[in-house]
Image: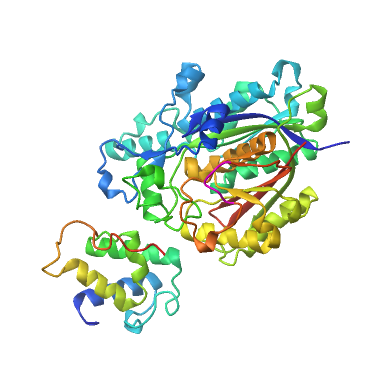
């Protein structure tokens, strides 16, 4: 039986727009979603080395969700719910006409419910009143709260999983959704990536780790600059991306609109260092090669790479090295961009937002700009990186996602 | 210079971090190659030094810290700034340094 898998619906919550069309319009216009963090509950902001982030500033959960549903879940799960809702609607899937046991949910989240988590922990230690810990603390902080609530919202009774591999979480969510359908466990998967943890503690933790940009606190829109010489760390973001993956047979049967096929996937570990990639790029190259082999294609057939490219000195240079190593002459032909230049590093949502960019690039033939690519770092120069929109027929796209914990993922998308 | 109280404190901090006798740590040792600190270990060590001396070490200054004596001199400079310089606030000394 044909077990090819296609993308039939998209949903987005991002610092540059709520909803896929708003996101895509802003992305093509190269609009940065990075803004100054105004205040964290009166914390002295000058003690944060970085003070900018890709924030979703205009998100009102009650606009999209019933108030009890919105109140009961943490921000990251609200994002997941709203993005999934959009993706399901976009796919035209009618849940009442489906066998609910054949529809699953896989959510990728790096940090989870940190908004309530931080608040409750802080209050307990301050007040020392354990009897005042909110009853909803455990259901919200449990890392599968988002996948649970998305399934409940749609009556999806198939596989329900949460993947937490830091920054590669949702690339794996999509990859595992592909595997689920290929192996016949389900016909449809709602694959979501989400994170909303621009919180006083998590943000301070990333500051202490010295991974964030600190040079552009006064010009936030310039802070996320993958591949540019002046890049000085990533910019933390928040958001969610959702994709409806379904078997080609199922999509055809219901005459669904198909954005792209999900053709291949690789999951690897560098088994090297908890936060540093192997500097020769060999493991990243091997991950991409494995995904392409799974899709049955060669590097020469790839038209576009949505790079992991977080805007750190080491990470971007290693990724370019890996691309050159694997793609050889093709490295100068393939188009490459960094969605994080627009929205920052949305952690668990990063893979899903990159996947949305891949699906739309295949669907529309447009590759969004890498903003702030003003002065190319010699270590990161590739002919296919541009600060402007590039138009070309995209038959095959490759999504990269590399996470803390030595964790790598790559997903291949193909025109259907 | 290597026997100043600051130098001793830094060597003690290094010794404690590396679980190594501080007297075996010499100013000419490079943090990366001689003492085996990777970039994550450097960040952890500097976190400890920031706490010990109540300092804020900006990211830009990290690349100047190659040897143990670099760290000692850096901390001494930060704690006893030359009179011509303003001793105010964390680290505005290297604003325009090229980020390599």
Q: Quadrant of residue A286?
A: bottom right
Q: Is residue A111 visible?
A: no
Q: Is residue A9 above or below residue B46?
A: above
Q: Quadrant of residue B76?
A: bottom left
Q: Quadrant of the C terminus of chain B?
A: bottom left
* Residue lying at 48% horizontally and 27% vertically, measured from the top left: A73
* Outermost residue to the right: A1
Residue A264 coordinates in the image, percent (x, y): 74, 46
Relative placement, left or right, of A338 versus A49 is: right
Q: Is residue B44 above or below residue A36?
A: below
Q: Quadrant of residue A89?
A: top right
Q: Quadrant of the N terminus of chain B?
A: bottom left
Magenta stretch, main secondary structure, is loop
Residue A348 coordinates in the image, percent (x, y): 54, 42
The front one of A166 and A229 is A229
Q: Is residue B82 above or below residue A408?
A: below
* Residue lying at 55% horizontally and 36% vertically, measured from the top left: A28
Magenta span: A385-389
Relative placement, left or right, of A160 versus A76 is: right
């Amino acid at each position: 039986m044909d077990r090819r898998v296609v993308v039939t619906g998209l949903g987005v919550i991002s610092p540059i727009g709520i909803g896929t069309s708003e996101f895509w319009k802003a992305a093509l216009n190269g609009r940065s979603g990075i803004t100054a963090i105004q205040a964290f509950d009166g914390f002295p902001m000058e003690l944060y080395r970085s003070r900018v982030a890709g924030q979703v500033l205009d998100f009102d959960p009650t606009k999209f969700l019933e108030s009890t549903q919105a109140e009961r879940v943490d921000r990251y799960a609200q994002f997941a719910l709203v993005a999934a809702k959009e993706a399901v609607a976009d796919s035209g899937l009618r849940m009442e006409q489906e066998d609910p046991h054949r529809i699953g949910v896989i959510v990728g989240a790096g940090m989870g419910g940190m908004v309530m988590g931080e608040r409750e922990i802080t209050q307990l230690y301050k007040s020392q009143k354990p009897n005042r810990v909110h009853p909803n603390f455990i259901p919200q902080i449990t890392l599968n709260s988002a996948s649970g609530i998305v399934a409940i919202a749609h009556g999806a009774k198939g596989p329900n999983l949460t993947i937490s591999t830091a920054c590669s979480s949702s690339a794996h969510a999509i990859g595992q959704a592909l595997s689920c359908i290929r192996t016949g466990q389900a016909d449809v998967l709602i694959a979501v990536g989400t994170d909303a943890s621009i919180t006083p503690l998590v943000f301070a933790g990333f500051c202490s780790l010295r991974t964030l940009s600190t040079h552009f606190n006064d010009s936030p829109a310039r802070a996320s600059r993958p591949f540019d010489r002046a890049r000085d760390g990533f910019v933390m973001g928040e958001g969610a991306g959702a994709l409806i993956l379904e078997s080609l047979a199922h999509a055809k049967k219901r005459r669904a609109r198909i954005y792209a096929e999900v053709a291949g996937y690789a999951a690897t570990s560098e088994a090297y260092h908890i936060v540093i990639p192997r500097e020769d790029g060999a493991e990243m190259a091997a991950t991409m090669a494995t995904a392409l082999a799974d899709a049955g294609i060669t590097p020469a057939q790839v038209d576009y790479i949505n790079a992991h490219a977080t805007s750190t000195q080491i990470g971007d240079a290693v990724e370019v090295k890996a691309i050159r190593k694997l793609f050889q002459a093709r490295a100068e032909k393939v188009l490459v961009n960094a969605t994080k230049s627009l929205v920052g590093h949305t952690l668990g949502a990063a893979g899903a937002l990159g996947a949305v960019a891949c699906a739309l690039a295949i669907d529309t033939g447009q590759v969004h700009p890498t903003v702030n690519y003003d002065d190319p770092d010699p270590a990161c120069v590739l002919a296919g990186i541009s600060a402007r929109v590039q138009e070309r027929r995209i038959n095959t796209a490759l999504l990269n996602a590399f996470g803390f914990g030595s964790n790598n993922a790559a997903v291949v998308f193909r025109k259907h | 210079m290597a026997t100043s109280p600051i130098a001793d404190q830094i060597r003690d901090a290094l010794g404690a971090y590396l679980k190594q006798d501080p007297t075996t740590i010499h100013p000419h040792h490079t943090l990366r190659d001689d003492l085996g600190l990777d970039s994550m270990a450097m960040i952890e060590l500097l976190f400890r030094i920031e706490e010990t001396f109540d300092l804020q070490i900006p990211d830009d200054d990290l690349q100047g810290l190659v040897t143990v004596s670099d760290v000692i001199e850096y901390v001494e400079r930060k704690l006893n700034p030359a009179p011509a310089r303003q001793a105010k606030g964390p680290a505005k000394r290297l604003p325009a340094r090229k980020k390599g």
